[in-house]
Amino acid sequence: MKKSKDTFILVVPAYNEELYIEDTILSWIKLLKQLPCSEILVINDGSTDKTVKILDYLSKNNPTIKVVHKKNEGHGKTILRGYKEAILSKHEWIFQTDGDGHYSASNFYSLWEKRQSSDFLLGHRLKRHDPFYRIILSVLASLWVYVLFGVYIKDANIPFRLIRRKYLGNLLKRIPNNVFAPNIFLSILARIDGHNLFYIPVSHKLRRKAHASTFKILKGAYKSFYELLLFKISFKGSR
């Protein structure tokens, strides 16, 4: 049996992903066979489609999959719930990605091979298959982070990241509990702490489901920018 330091737990938030969640999870199951004793933790954010039934079936037939069902609270709170559950595990490493199949599990090894070089590793979307306005918002977010915190992060919110469990536990104590985009906050703190995030290029697949409305996305972006401003005002150092 591999020691816990050689394993990871995958955190996957999911909401109404009935068309893609099974293929996504099965692709990671194949990868887990190369790293025995690793696990998958799926946090279902109150899905109203067949996602619940699919996840229950998968977890029933595979002991490496744990599913937590909760009421709908939004993506940010769902990610935080997953992280908090994951830091209670025995695994040395925590990996986070989304359940919509935008990222290939095979890209995981590019981060995993560098795990001894940093406590916090980020992918970045080599060729981003997103609507133009999403790309612009991502660029603006990087600029906003630089203006506020003096650090440049290539893809601060990417859901393709590998973090040492103990370090993640420390980071979670330093960010608000209800932020819209917690991954951005975690990336900022890791960079300020002096970690080399590496920004490892990963493939990004075309979004295959209906996009959220432009208004909803812009509203979320505004909220994130405002929360970062408040965080900067209250920021008292990185340690």
Image (cartoon, helix red, strand yellow):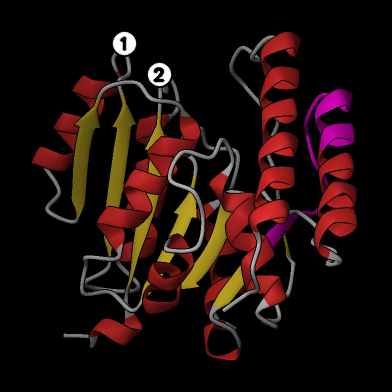
- What residue is shown with label 1? 48
Q: Is residue 55 above or below residue 116?
A: above
- What residue is shown with label 2? 16
Q: Is residue 41 above or below residue 33?
A: above
Query: Dot 2, how many residues are within 10 Å of its Cα: few (below 14), some (14-19), or many (20+)?
Result: some
Q: Position of residue 190 (x, y in %)?
A: 63, 71
Magenta segment range? Answer: 123-137
Circles 2 and 1: CB distance less than 8 Å?
yes
Dot 1 amino acid type: Thr
Q: Nearer the viewer, residue 107 or 51?
A: 51
The secondary structure type at the circle numbered 1 is loop
Q: Is residue 171 above or below residue 112?
A: above
| Residue located 31% across and 38% down the image | 43
| Residue located 22% across and 65% down the image | 88
The verdict on residue 129 being magenta is yes
The secondary structure type at the circle numbered 2 is loop
Q: Is residue 77 left or right of residue 88?
A: right
Query: Dot 1, how many residues are within 10 Å of its Cα: few (below 14), some (14-19), or many (20+)?
Result: few
Residue 202 shows in this picture:
no
The quarter in which the N terminus is drawn is bottom left
Dot 2 amino acid type: Asn
Q: Is residue 140 left or right of residue 106?
A: right
